[in-house]
Amino acid sequence: MSACATPPKTPKPEWLKIRLSHGKELQTINRLMREQRLATVCEEARCPNLHECWNKGTATFLILGDTCTRSCGFCNIKTGRPGIVDWDEPDRVVDAVSKMNLKYVVLTSVDRDELPDKGAGVFALTIHKLRKAFPELKIEVLIPDFKGDYSALRLVLQEKPDVLNHNVETAARLYRTVRPQADYQQSLTLLQRAKKNGFYTKSGFMVGIGENDEDIRGIIRDLHAHQVDFITIGQYLQPTTKHLPVDRYVHPDAFDEFARYAREIGVPKVQSGPLVRSSYHADDAFAGHGVLSA
């Protein structure tokens, strides 16, 4: 455990306590999502920044339904047998983006391992329709690993998203517990393939889920070795008692150290802080340079 870590049985530290807001913008977006029958990862994953982002009029769209074929130990999205693919969903995303007047959109999804293309076709169609409707819109995709299917990845890349994001989530040695249906090296390979095709790549991981500081430095080195442009690092928070417990609360000073280490070895951009999530302030982070704290 890091010297800057707090044992998990202690109360949640002050730096993780969030003042919730219930502004009019939040209510408007919530109503819009219900009307459009859309889900957001902000809600499904119980993101601590939901109120801030929604009050600013931004959201990360969760496409391909709200039921995942995998059962990761940290994730609050429900696991089960998803329904049929809703090919009208991309049109509803376009309509929502128009009503929210967004300039930067993040698209993510549940895992759909049962589909021949693992859901890549819906990603591609959604990007295509957004590009046609809003030529100036910046689009980031936070994709699953597609079980290593390169043809699925190509399907997404053909529509030219501005940012290709895929999270490794944690250290390789913890995958059996944290991400039992995923493969660490497979995720790294996916990111490198996207980079070799000329795309801006991004990946993130959590701390406080069983790793140590050397694991963290190792993940950063691995991502850098696979040419990832932008790394996000945030504190793991247990969604419910049914999920993996928090192993430690990491002090903000330690997050600053992780960012410094990444910068020293040559990572172009880092966003590192207790409340950082992969899509948090995605528009600000993509426009910025160097190390970004949160």
Image (tube, rainbow, N blue to C red):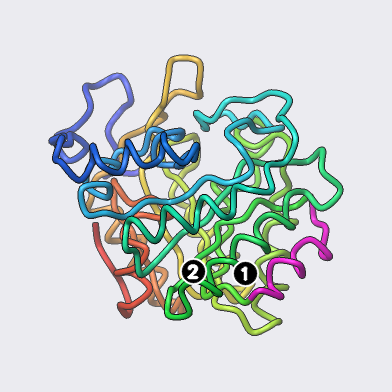
| Element at label 2 | strand
Q: Quadrant of residue 32?
A: top left
| Element at label 1 | helix
Q: Is residue 291 left or right of 213 when viewed as pictured?
A: left
* Residue 33 screen position, x and y as percent: 40, 40
* Residue found at x 50% / y 71%: 133
Mark pair 2, 1: CA separation: 10 Å
Q: Amino acid at mark 2?
A: Ile
Q: First in sequence: mark 2 or mark 1?
A: 1
Q: Quadrant of residue 187?
A: bottom right
Q: Main secondary structure of the magenta part?
A: helix
* Residue found at x 77% / y 70%: 154
* Closer to us: 196 or 178: 196
> What's the magenta region?
147-159
Is 291 drawn above or below residue 172 in the view shown?
A: below
Is 292 drawn above or below residue 253 in the view shown?
A: below
Q: Which residue is mark 1?
A: 128
* Residue 40 screen position, x and y as percent: 45, 42
Q: Is residue 76 left or right of 81 when viewed as pictured?
A: left
Q: Is residue 174 left or right of 16 when viewed as pictured?
A: right
Q: Which residue is mark 2?
A: 139
Q: Quadrant of residue 226?
A: bottom right
